[in-house]
Image: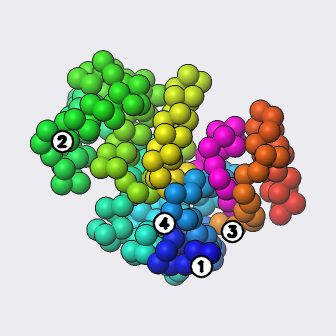
Amino acid sequence: MQDATSAALWIERLCVSYRTSALQPPRRVVHELSLAVAPGEVVGFLGPNGAGKSSTIKAILGFLTPDSGQVRVFGQSAGTPAAKQRLGYLPEVALYYPFLTPMETLWLYGKLQKLGGRELQRESYDLLKRVGLEGYEKRPLKTFSKGMQQRLGIAQALLGSPDLLVLDEVTSGVDPIGRRHLRELLAEVRARGTTIFFSSHELDEVAQLCDRVLLIAKGRCLDERRMDTALRAGIGSPLEDYFVTTIQKAA
Ligand SMILES: Nc1ncnc2c1ncn2[C@@H]1O[C@H](COP(=O)(O)OP(=O)(O)OP(=O)(O)O)[C@@H](O)[C@H]1O
């Protein structure tokens, strides 16, 4: 049983609202959401469009201030340097400077993490190789396809060997070969004991990678369950059935 100090990720009664106009009251998009992820666990965060997945992820990163509730990363309050140090993050849309190369990009992100020197250079080459960008280390990103940029995003998220990897739509825009490659990479990251929390609409992928899935809709947790063989079997269809029927029942 996890608690706020032992969990890799602990969210308790999180509420998030957005104000889109000074004339309108804020609109709440995450309602009293609670969840816990154990160290080393791989959890898929599922839900239909607009369910509140990215908003929850932004609260984990400390990018927004919740109305109420608490978010902790390895016992540290979200958004604090101590929490950020343990986190690697790939946003839903990762934007990089088009005139920089992958090596320069990782150098920049490494510097922001206070990494540097030969160690950073070695880690950057190693990561680019692991994500399948060997040979592209010194090409400007403006020549990269979306899938190649996404691979760079994974390398950036893995820089500094984070203990918790938070991925928002990790394989969006990646071709089937790239997806397989990324799945293998995440399986390898997981085997090293890294906790992974990721949102995805790719249920095949979720079925193959996750220990557990959490399903949210309209900012509320609908269900959670372990990925057993019944949900893994077939070509993702049992998990798709579970997703569709649980959402429909709640509606
Ligand atoms: N910056 C913002 N300002 C106002 N409303 C926002 C903002 N970001 C998200 N929302 C709204 O919050 C709700 C939840 O959005 P969120 O992006 O968290 O959902 P999601 O589950 O990640 O969706 P998707 O699967 O489509 O990426 C949506 O209704 C969205 O329109």
Please rate how many residues cluster around mark 4, counting C-alpha atoms within 10 Å: few if below 14, some from 14 to 19, many from 20. many
Instruction: Report x, y in % for residue 153.
Output: 39, 39
For disc 2, the marked residue is 119
- Determine contact: label 3, label 2, CB under 8 Å: no
In this rendering, position of residue 126 left or right of residue 17: left
Residue 54 visible in the shown view: no
Please rate how many residues cluster around mark 3, counting C-alpha atoms within 10 Å: few if below 14, some from 14 to 19, many from 20. some
**Please, what secondary structure does the residue beneath circle 4 have?**
loop
Q: Is residue 202 magenta?
A: yes
For disc 4, the marked residue is 8
Query: Nearer the observer, disc 3 or disc 2?
Result: 2
Q: Which mark is residue 226?
A: none
In this rendering, position of residue 194 left or right of residue 238: left
Q: Where 219 sits versus 159, above or below?
A: below
**Please, what secondary structure does the residue beneath circle 1 have?**
strand
Q: Which mark is residue 220?
A: 3
Cα–Cα gap, marks 3 and 1: 10 Å
Amino acid type at mark 4: Ala
- Determine contact: label 1, label 2, CB under 8 Å: no
Residue sitting at x 59%, y 24%: 176
**Please, what secondary structure does the residue beneath circle 3 have?**
strand
Q: Looking at the image, which is closer to me, 145 or 6? A: 6
**Please, what secondary structure does the residue beneath circle 2 have?**
helix
In this rendering, position of residue 214 left or right of residue 130: right
For disc 1, the marked residue is 13
Residue sitting at x 75%, y 65%: 222
Amino acid type at mark 2: Glu
Q: Earlier in the sequence, mark 4 or mark 2?
A: 4
Instruction: Report x, y in % for residue 52.
Output: 60, 61
